[in-house]
Image: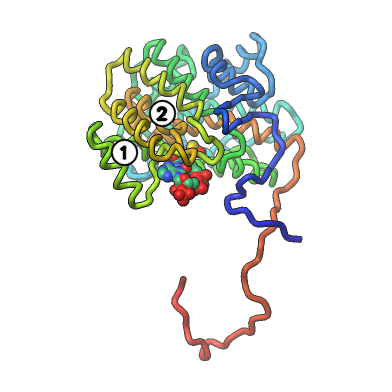
Amino acid sequence: MSGEYKPGLEGIPATQSNISYIDGQQGILEYRGIRIEELCAHSSFLETAYLLIFGELPTAVQLQQFESDILYRRRIKYRIRDMIKCFPESAHPMDALQTCVSALGMFYPLTYKDFHDPQYTYDASTWLLAKVPTIVAAFQLMRKGNDPVLPHDDLSYAANMLYMLNEKAPDLEVAQIFDTCLILHAEHTVNASTFCALVTASTLNDPYVVLASAIGTLGGPLHGGANEQVMQMLEKIGTVENVGPYLAEKLARKERIPGFGHRVYRTKDPRAIVLQRLVEQLFDRLGHDRYYDVAVALEEQGTERLGEKGIFPNVDFYSGLIYRKLGIPTDLFTPVFAIARTAGWLAHWREQLSDNRLFRPTQVYTGRHDVRYTPLTARSGRALQ
Ligand code: CMC
C-alpha cells in the first residue's frame, strides 16, 4: 500500500492530541484550550507544566505537592557531575544535555515500569522537570572550570535556574519574566522534536530516552537552534543602518533569515508578540540593549519583504535578547528552550502511552529491483553521490 509522499509530512496528522492547538492563520496558541496570553498573565511555568502533562489546572494542594516534589528532586548525582567533568569544554551544551538526560535513566530507573500506573508518569515527570535545569547549569559552570552551584531550596523554579547559572539570585520581576519565557516555550503541538518523542515513546522505551531523542532533534538549526542563530545574526548586523543591506544580500543569495517563518503560522507568532513585550519590560528594568533596535528594524524590513509569503517573526526572534540580558550565553539558548519544552514532551509521552500503537510509517520506494550482483573484479566504479 502506498500513499502520496509529502516531504516533511507537511499537513499529515501524525497523532490525535488534546494537549495544544494552533490556528496558524489567526496566530492563536492554546494549551489544553487556554490561550497562551492568559497563561502568561496568570499562571506559572510549573502550574502550566502540570496542566499540560495531566490535562487540568491543579488544585492548590496538587500544585503545592507538585512544586515540592520537583524542589526536592533538583539535585543530580555526583557521578553525573563527574561525567560532565569529562566532556570537552568545547562541547555544545545541547549535546551535553542529551547525553546526561539519557544517562539519568541509568541512575533513576523506574523499577515499577508500569506505563498505566499514574505514579510512574508522575515520578518520571517530576524527576525530569527537576533535573534538566540542574544539568544545564552544571555544564555551564563546569566548562568554565568552576564547581556547579547546588539548587537553592528557597527559590522558585525560574529564579533557581538563573541562580544556578549566574551564582546570583535574580529579583522577583526578572524571575517572573524568565518564568513567562518558559511558559511560552513549553509546548507547540507536533513539531519535529515532539514527533521524535512520540516515535520513541511508542516503542515503550523509558522516558529518559524519549526526552534524550527529543533534545537531539530540538538542537537542529531549523528547529530550536534558530534562537542562537538570531542572536549571532543581530551581532553581525550590529547597527540599524546595516539592516537593509544585510537583508538585501541575504535574500539575493536566497538564504533564510533566522527567526523568521514557520510551517504553521502565516502571521506573527503569538509567542513572539508576548516575548517582544517581555523584552521591553526587562530592558526597562535592567537597561536597554542596542540589538533590540536592530531586531525591530529587521522585523519591519523583513516583514515588508517576506510578509506576502506569510513569513513573519517566530518564537526564536526575540527570546535571545531576553536570555542575553539575563546573562545566559548564546549557546545555552536552546538548552533553555529544552528546559521549557520538557513539559510538552512529557505531556505527549503520557498521551502516547494512554493509547499506544508503535509508529511504523511506510515509504515510497524509488530504488531499483532485480539487480544482479556484480563480482568485485567486474565493477567499473561510480563516484559516490
Ligand atoms: N527567510 C527567508 N525566506 C524564508 C524563510 C526565512 N526564514 N522561511 C521561509 N522562507 C521562504 C522560502 O525560501 C520559500 O520561498 P520560495 O517559495 O520563494 O522558495 C517560502 O518561504 C516557503 O518556504 P518553505 O521552506 O516551504 O517553508 P517551511 O514551512 O518548510 O519552513 C522553516 C519553515 C521554519 C523551516 C523556515 O521558515 C525557516 O527555515 N526559518 C528559519 C529558521 C527558523 O527560524 N526556525 C525556527 C522555527 S520556529 C521554532 C521551532 O520550530 O523550533
- Kindly identify which numbered label has been placed on residue 63: none
**Element type where label 1 sits in the image:** helix
Label 1 crowd (10 A; few <14 / some 14-19 / many >=20): some
Q: Is residue 144 left or right of residue 54?
A: left
Q: Amino acid at mark 1?
A: Gln
Image coordinates of residue 306 in percent, x first then y, are 42, 40
Residue shown at 24% from the left, 34% from the top: 238
Q: Quadrant of residue 212?
A: top right
Disc 1/disc 2 C-alpha distance (Å) = 13 Å
> Would residue 341 be visible to someone looking at this image?
yes
Q: Image point 55% across, 12% down: which residue?
A: 42
| Residue nearer the viewer, 36 or 212 | 36
- Residue 168 in picture, x, y percent from top left: 34, 18
Q: Give the residue at mark 2.
A: 319
Q: Residues within 10 Å of mark 2 (few under 14, many from 20)?
A: many
Q: How many marks?
A: 2
Q: If you read the primary sequence from the N terminus, does the residue marked by circle 1 or circle 2 appear first?
A: 1
| Residue 221 in view, yes or no | no
Q: Quadrant of residue 280?
A: top left
Q: Nearer the viewer, residue 207 or 245?
A: 245
149 above or below 43?
A: below
Q: Which mark is residue 232?
A: 1
**Quadrant of the snapshot with the N terminus:** bottom right
